[in-house]
Image (spheres, rainbow, N blue to C red):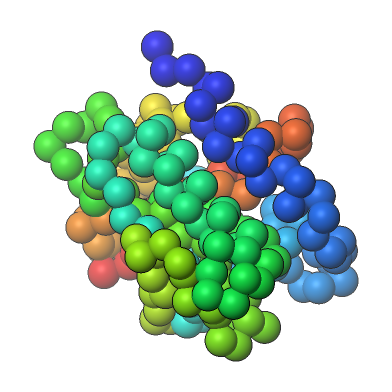
Amino acid sequence: MHSRIPVLFIFLHGVQLLLSAPVQNSAESGEPWFCRELECPAYVVVKSYENFEERRYEASCWMTTELEGSYTRAVYLGFMRLFWYINGNNAAGEKIPMTTPVITRVAPTTDQKHLTNVSVAFFVSPQVADPPKPNDESIHLSSFPAGNFYVRSFGGYAVEQDYIKNIKALMEDLKVAGLPFDNQHYIIAGYDPPFRFINRHNEVWLSSA
């Protein structure tokens, strides 16, 4: 049985930073409701389906780190690397505002019960024109081109098996709908800190082919 504690522990380290972030009403800023007071990548909904939607994301930049091993451990280590980067572990010693979501890019493996070979990334706000160089050499700046993604959303405190279940469900829905998608990787997006107990929001993304 997979414990929920490690996943929650990952985000406890970010609570102080999240609480100190500038509060901005999502309705006023034009952000989706689930981004709440944090900045998130811009997109438009191309089409809504019964169990998922197609989104068109603008080009964006992300601070990224790659890891191998068990999903829970990899996400924990990746999150902490990136958290310390935005909290001043960079060449400029600058603190960078927290954004959302934290995404985990997963490469499929022959093991369908567990997730391995992942990269964890923090969205870089367009307002940060020249992100400072990371002191940690395992972190690098990635540029994501504009593109379309199929997105399935679900609530609750999500753990590894919840993501696997929803990824499989999204793949099946896309096959039934006859919509081609990139099966070389998929993305897990988490939006909420652990102190949010209700109305939580999680997503899995598949890139359109």
Could you tell me residue 160's position as x and y percent? Answer: 41, 31
Q: Residue at x 48, y 76 (%)?
A: 133
Q: Quarter of the image holding residue 192? A: top right
Query: Residue at point 73% right, 61% down?
Result: 38
Q: Nearer the viewer, residue 110 or 5?
A: 5
Q: Residue at x 43, y 43 (%)?
A: 77
- Is residue 73 among the parts visible in the rendering? yes
What is the quadrant of residue 195 in the picture? Answer: top right
- Horizontally, residue 111 falls left or right of residue 141, namely left
Residue furthest to the bottom in view is 129
Measured along the vertical axis of the image, is residue 94 above or below residue 13? below
Where residue 168 appears, as percent x and y from the top left, is: 32, 39
Q: Which residue is rendered at x = 56% and y = 86% of the image? A: 130
Relative to 143, say whether 134 is above or below. Answer: above
Above/below status of 110 relative to 16: above
**Count of numbered badges drawn on the protein:** 0
Is residue 205 visible to us here? no
Instruction: Give the left or right position of residue 180, taking residue 143 as reference.
Output: left
On-image quarter of the C terminus: bottom left
Quadrant containing the N terminus in the rendered view: top left
In the picture as drawn, the residue positioned furthest to the left comes out as 110
Q: Where residue 150 sits in the image (x, y, percent)? A: 42, 59
Q: Position of residue 126 (x, y in %)?
A: 61, 82
